[in-house]
Each structure stands twice: as C-alpha cells, then as structure tokens.
Amino acid sequence: MASGLKKTTAGALAYVLGPITGIIFLIIDKDPFVRFHAMQSTVVFVGLFILQWILGFTIILLPLVPIIGIVSFVLWLILIYKAWQGEEWSVPVLGKIAKNLVKKV
C-alpha cells in the first residue's frame, strides 16, 4: 500500500472529505478495497452534490435540499463506519457504478 495505512483505515479516510479524499486515495493506493471505497466516495458525493444543485434551482423542489443534506450526512457516517469495519458495502445504484469505474481506472 502506498498510503502506509491499514486498508480499513485508508478506506474510511477515503470518505472524510468526499470526492477530494476519494480522488487522493484513488491516486496513491493500489489496494482494491481502498480503491473501491475511494471511487464510491467520489461517485456518491459528486452525485449528491449535483442533485442538491439541481434541486436548488427549482422553486417547487427547493424544500428537498435540506433533506438531501441530512441523507448525505447520514450516508457519509454509514460509509465511513462500514469501511472502518472492513465491509465493502455498496450504495444502491451508485455503488455498482463505482465498482465498474474502478475496474476501468
């Protein structure tokens, strides 16, 4: 491992700053477990950011923005915990996309 961390620690840290740490760990770590979590962090949190951004432009759906924020925070905590426990837990739909993308990178 290029990061010098245990894979569970590196996997959990890949979520700490969302896509920022996700991309960093994609670049510096070659472990498949860490790379999956790094890619999932990037895909999930970029996707949620885009969703919040789009909802923010629609007057009717604007009240959903705080709900997406709360869901994002809870999901962030769950993903850090699951990675720390050594689980390769996938977020529905986006986790599958992350698995496919990490194979290509």
Image (tube, rainbow, N blue to C red):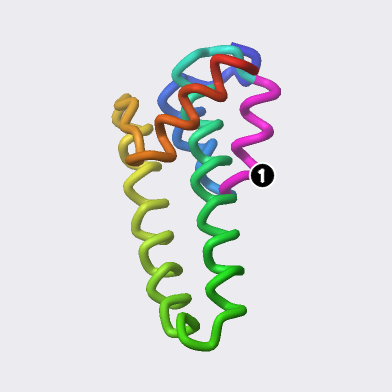
Q: Residues within 10 Å of mark 1 (few under 14, many from 20)?
A: some
Q: Is residue 89 above or below residue 29?
A: below
> What residue lies at 60% left-to-right and 37% top-to-bottom?
22
> From the viewer's perspective, is 64 left or right of 23?
left
Find the residue positioned furthest to the bottom: 59
Q: Quadrant of residue 28?
A: top right
Up-down relation of residue 33 to residue 71 (above or below): above
Please provide percent x and percent y for residue 13. Answer: 52, 37
Closer to the camera in the image, 102 or 60: 60
* Residue in the picture at 42% in, 77% down: 64
Indicate the quadrant where residue 104 lies. Answer: top right
The amino acid sitting under disc 1 is: Ile
What secondary structure prevails in the magenta region?
Answer: helix
Where residue 25 appears, x then y in whole percent?
Answer: 62, 28
Q: Quadrant of the N terminus?
A: top right
Q: Residue at x 41, y 61 (%)?
A: 73
* Residue 53 on the magenta segment: no
Q: Indicate whether 97 appears above or below 78.
A: above
Q: Does 24 lie within the magenta span?
A: yes
Give the structural element (helix, strand or loop) at label 1.
helix
- Labels in figure, total: 1
Name the spot of residue 47 as percent of width and height, x first. Answer: 54, 51
Choose between 47 and 13: the one closer to the eye.
Answer: 47
Residue 1 placement, left or right of 72: right
| Residue found 59% across the figure and 69% down from its top | 54
According to the picture, the residue beneath numbered tag 1 turns out to be 20
**Quadrant position of the C terminus in the picture:** top right
**Where does residue 99 sit, x and y in percent of width and height?**
46, 24
Q: Which residues are magenta?
A: 18-28
